[in-house]
Amino acid sequence: MDYIAHIRSSDGKVQKVEEHLLEVKSLAEQYGEKLGIKHLAGLAGMLHDLGKYTNDFRNYILEAVNNPDSPPKRGSIDHSTAGGKLLFELYHSSEKRDPLKCIVSEIIGNAIISHHSYLHDFLNPNNESPYLYRVQQKELNQYEAARNHFFENVISEMDFQNYVNKAVEELNNLFVKTSSSLVEQQLMFLTKFIFSILIDSDRTNTKEFEENAGESTYMETPLLFEKYYERLMDKINSFKMSNHSDSPINKLRANMSNQCDEFAGRPSGIYTLSIPTGGGKTLASLRYALKHAQIHGKKRIVFVVPYTTIIEQNAEEVRKILQEEANILEHHSNVIMDDQDNDESLDGLINVNQKLKLAKDNWDAPIIFTTMIQYLNVFFAKGSRNIRRLHNLAESIIIFDEVQKVPIHCVSLFNQSLNFLKTFGKSSIVLCTATQPALDFVEHKLEINTDGEMVQNLDEVINAFKRTEIVDMATGNLFDSERLSDFVVDKIKEINSVLVILNTKTVVRKLYTLLKEKDIGIAIYHLSTSMCASHRKEILKGVRENLENGNKIICISTQLIEAGVNVSFECVIRSLAGLDSIAQAAGRCNRHGEKPLQQVYIIDHCEENLKNLKEIKVGKQAARKIFADLKVDNTAHGGNALSTKAIERYFKEFYTDFQSNLNYFIPQLGKEMTELLSSNKKVYSYHKAFKHATGQSLPLFLANSYRTAAEHFQVIDQIATGVLVPYGDGREIITELNGSGSIDDLSNLMRKAQQYTINLFSYELDQLDKEGGLVSYLNGKVLALKEGAYSEEFGLDLDSRSQYSVKIF
């Protein structure tokens, strides 16, 4: 009798369990080989659906096919525990347990039992072991039969034991490279990598079977990167033909770009690229990456940025230069709401919900642009959606643009993830910013390579690149919106363009409204994250046209315009914030050195409510001290608020103020996340509590709390949900999502939808829901705003009193 893994919805074809297990094993081995964990990964692949070798599961899936109107409850048959149980039985039952085999069984077993949800806790805050319950205590019907079928149809017991021995050897090789104090940390990352590989292998094979697509073909990236490098160099060489190629700034840009090219020959590691704002770091870092990838055989290039605006601009710029669309992935928000806790819906039949899950990007493109939130979610957030992408960060070049924007509470976790990628993932990491944060100053230090700065004589470069002067109007002085609007009007009389950057959306909107009411006959623009990407792009297009034509223009924006948005104003007014933000704001002024030194005015806006913006508040206080010192002694901190001395002093003070937050403290538990994830069992406080409560040690080698940590992980304080908006083509996308298409159709729509999505906090969703401003699609998986809740002027318009309309739906 054939046992069934999946039944294809289009033609009813059966995928047998052994076919699925062997195909997933093969894929997992391919993915694992790049980290030297081919057999560890393959072990998870071949065992993950062992529980489908039962009559119960066979009857369950046939019942679902035969009675589509009244199918059995999804996930009602447990098929994911059996593989983990087999490993536990084989290697934990003996009195003379082999520690390495036990650790292998715990790592692989956890991945297997979790592959429809998220990694289990070995020990949780309630002195319980959810992992141990699943593999030791839970009763499984027909388990012995399933085990026998596995050894008869997939692999013999002798070959299985030999395979496990090879997996143990791989684990031992990992230990050789690891200092004793970091073993648990590296085991945590190894577990997550294997879990990622299993999720992606399982989903990929399921998708290939459902789409009848045959085995995936993988692109040879070296040839691709060679072609891209040639196209980039053609573009860079074309700059030499421009009228301004001999300007001091353009010569500096060319020199720094050449230094990045030379640096590409260095081995993999963690490096810094401290090109000043406006120095061309996107193209310089791409030049390094494309050449380094060819020399060292890297598989992909990942740009990680703090804001979606940078993705939009940088991805578009790179696409044009490389003359490429298909191989450049933009990934910045998840439009589909995920069933985080239970993914048993992928247990046999494929419907609309499963198609959405299979359509999610796994980051297998050669060049990827994504956000810091997405990067950190891949490592630490709950659910299979994010972690599926993790293994594709190995053998990559990862460029962090504006790395100083790493959220404070995530600094230690961020540093640990990069250290693992450097040491075990064979990845090269570039920290790219004009204001390098002191990430090697904190407790969990970042292992930056010695002599790791790509640009030589940095202080000289910074001085040569100076195009603005910082004017301190904040020390001992306050502005409200009225006074600021008068100041802006006075400045625009003297010059053609003024950019105002404030810390909150509320004051941005208020200042914009006040200036519009003054009716001064000048183009005034408003920018904030309440607008979708496409909307912001349209606004910025208008801004650039006015700037290029020399028209008088005022732009009022939140900090989204600071990082990476290529605009150049004659004057910038910046509300007091951290020195890194001020440096970024200065980069929007006189960007190409078109004029002699231009002014960047720093003001203190008294109407900004920073109660829930602690990092801006602390950064503001630290910057205020630097400015106060310079007021007293104009030679302090190198005589410049943005000197390397001032920036170093600023970040040390900033991190010192946040010292208790750097390891991600979880108030509800009174624990740091670093302890939950990577504490040694002997000193782990939960294990001490377990021993005190039960009088015995946990019969496992690992005791960490992966799921509890993930449940408490958020990059930002409030969880944001992606919501589609009725702006431009967003209307058409919303309509198309209501239809039923293939997985690839949905994938394409999801990617396109990112341009027409805004992220809303729970209080905003609640307000919209109460007022009838939301519509849900695809069984509630996708949310969209109704007409009237979105304004052409402000984006999301919670203050609108207009009647919400559903005419487009």
Image (tube, helix red, strand yellow):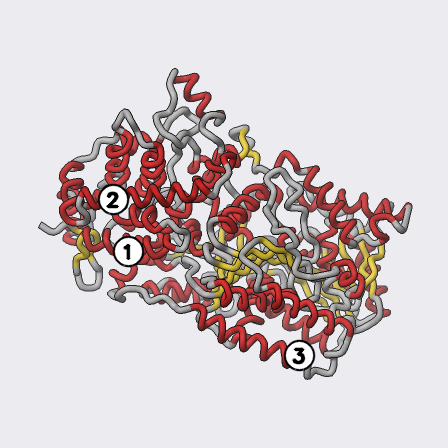
* In this picture, residue 505 sits left or right of residue 627: left
Residue 726 visible in rendering: no
* In this picture, residue 517 sits left or right of residue 792: right
Residue at 78% across, 71% down? 593
Q: Secondary structure at mark 3?
A: helix
Q: Secondary structure at mark 2?
A: helix
Q: Is label 3 in contact with label 1 (beta carbons under 8 Å)?
A: no
- Dot 2 amino acid type: Asn
* In this picture, residue 245 sits left or right of residue 314: right
Residue at 79% across, 65% down? 464
- Dot 1 amino acid type: Ser
When the figure is inspected, residue 682 is found, relative to residue 714, above or below; the finding is above
Residue 498 placed where, x, y %?
77, 65
Eye-nearest disc, 3 or 1: 1
- Dot 3 amino acid type: Phe
Eye-nearest disc, 2 or 1: 2
Sooner in the amino-acid sequence: mark 2 or mark 1: 1
| Quadrant in the rendering for residue 351 | bottom left
Q: Which residue is mark 3?
A: 239
Q: Which residue is mark 2?
A: 162
Q: Which residue is mark 1?
A: 26
Between residue 738 and residue 357, name the one nearer to us: 357
Between residue 766 and residue 90, name the one nearer to us: 90
Q: Tell how many labels.
A: 3
Say the numbered circle drawn on residue 190: none
Distance between the Cα atoms at labels 2 and 1? 17 Å
Residue 38 visible in rendering: yes
User: How many other residues sit within 10 Å of disc 3, few (<14), some (14-19) or many (≥20)?
Assistant: some
Sooner in the amino-acid sequence: mark 3 or mark 1: 1
Between residue 268 and residue 77, name the one nearer to us: 268
